[in-house]
Amino acid sequence: MTLLDDQRQSVSDPRADVPDVGQLPPLGVVPPKMHAQVIRPDRYGDPGTAFQREVVPTPKIGPGEVLIAVMAAGINYNNVWAARGYPVDQVTTRQRRGETEDFHIGGSDASGIVYAVGPDVDNISIGDEVIIHPGVWDENDPWIAAGRDQMIAPSARIWGYDTNYGSFGQFARVQAHQVLPKAPHLTWAEAAAPTLVGTTAYRMLHGWAGNTVQDGDLVLVWGGSGGLGTQASQLVRAAGGRAIAVVSDDERGEYAMKYGAIGYINRREFNHWGIPPLVDDTEGQKAWSASARAFGKKIWEIAGAKEDPAIVFEHPGAATIPTSIFVCRPGGMVTVCAGTTGFDAMVDLRYHWTRQKRLQGSHGTNDAQAAAYNQLVIEGKIDPCVGRVLTIDDIPRAHAEMGRGEEVFGNTVILIGASDPGAGKRS
Ligand code: NAP
């Protein structure tokens, strides 16, 4: 990590309570208040109106915590859910845990500069240029103290979704172990783009022993042009595998191929989505499996052989799980981190048990996976896939568009402390 050499110290009035967005106070000087995009329970619903820009107190940090001046923030689908207050009302959930704030400042991806370091934090200094991974937990959790996977611990949470003071404010509160070095060759905007989706994809593909992606493996990636999908295809390629993207038009397919997919399938050519006809509906089953088989043939065409995917990378959920289980190869794994189209996903157990497939839930990242993913970014093996670079006032609109499925190319980024999309490159 390096000290910021062109540290901008120009707030409109250095003694002002609130720095302007796009400007930073002197390094290490923490203003009492900050601008943030805030969700309040009485605004839950359409993300376009649930978020509003407010001036709020700058978060205080405690032992083991670090305060980050956010240079850029990444947009993720999780704050579409937070804005809707569904399926989890985050503010009420936190209040039940004893937290007092009656608002939510989301944002689970950030690049920024360390402005303050709490007690018991080693190896992090004011001025470090960093990115933040989204896994948060209690280090004293007995599960973690026993050396087990941090992200499965009862205390595990997603920063800036389950927790407050994420990256949609000028300052963010993080745990020290979330702080990772920023790739020097990336701008602030690029560095803020990929970590949540990238680390999630890394865990899905590398985290489940017995079914981790291997050299030569075929992997089917749903939403191949989206945030998760573009990261997944690149990670598959970096591991020597072959990703086939599923998309909803040719433009998205071309985009997916730019980021590592060897080919794509347009899901609009098929109509067997959602819960299939029940097993005793012979005619319905015939029609469903004919369409699912035709989909499988597209995979073979792209693979150049009658080869089924070793891993299916899932997140649409209800619409696609039956197909994912159907096309996954015997002994293979469907790894799922979301149910964007619905949570009532149906599995025809005949295909599941006789062919000994695995349906593996996956969520977030642990420290080791985040560090391994970030190293690939630092080495230039993973492109952050920046789609759009927007301003803090675009946060409501960007989430509304994402919620309607209109935001489909890579990752949207918001400039907060940075005023120029090209700023932040160090080499
Ligand atoms: P995104 O960038 O909006 O991409 C979603 C993709 O889903 C789109 O590219 C779209 O592609 C595809 N899609 C939409 N409707 C579909 C349908 N009916 N059938 C098949 N595909 C469909 O979102 P993302 O960042 O990749 O996130 C996707 C989901 O994963 C969200 O629910 C998010 O909350 C979740 N997530 C979970 C974790 C975790 O740790 N558990 C982490 C990151 C994200 P096409 O329309 O082109 O097919």
Image (spheres, rainbow, N blue to C red):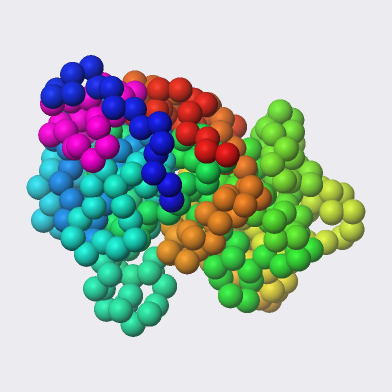
On screen, residue 280 versus residue 292, left or right, reads: left
Residue under the image location 20 percent in, 37 percent down: 29
Would you identify the image quadrant in which residue 324 lies? bottom right
Give the prevailing secondary structure in the magenta stretch.
Answer: loop
Q: How many marks?
A: 0
Foreground pick, 122 / 311: 122
Q: Position of residue 166 (x, y in %)?
A: 30, 43
- Residue 147 is a magenta residue: no
Residue under the image location 39 percent in, 66 percent down: 151
Residue under the image location 47 percent in, 34 percent down: 424
Would you identify the image quadrant in which residue 111 lies? top left
Residue under the image location 30 percent in, 79 percent down: 145
Q: Position of residue 268 (x, y in %)?
A: 69, 35
Q: Position of residue 1 (x, y in %)?
A: 43, 51
Foreground pick, 267 / 203: 203
Q: Evaluate whether residue 234 shows in this view.
A: yes
Q: Residue furthest right?
A: 304
Is 145 located above or below residue 274 in the figure? below
Q: Position of residue 149 (x, y in %)?
A: 41, 73
Q: Residue furthest top?
A: 12
Question: The C terminus appears in which quarter of the rendering?
Answer: top right
Foreground pick, 33 / 119: 119
On screen, residue 207 versus residue 188, left or right, reads: right
Q: Residue furthest front?
A: 5
- Residue 20 is a magenta residue: yes
Magenta range:
17-43
Q: Evaluate whether residue 133 shows in this view.
A: no
On screen, residue 168 versus residue 29, left or right, reads: right
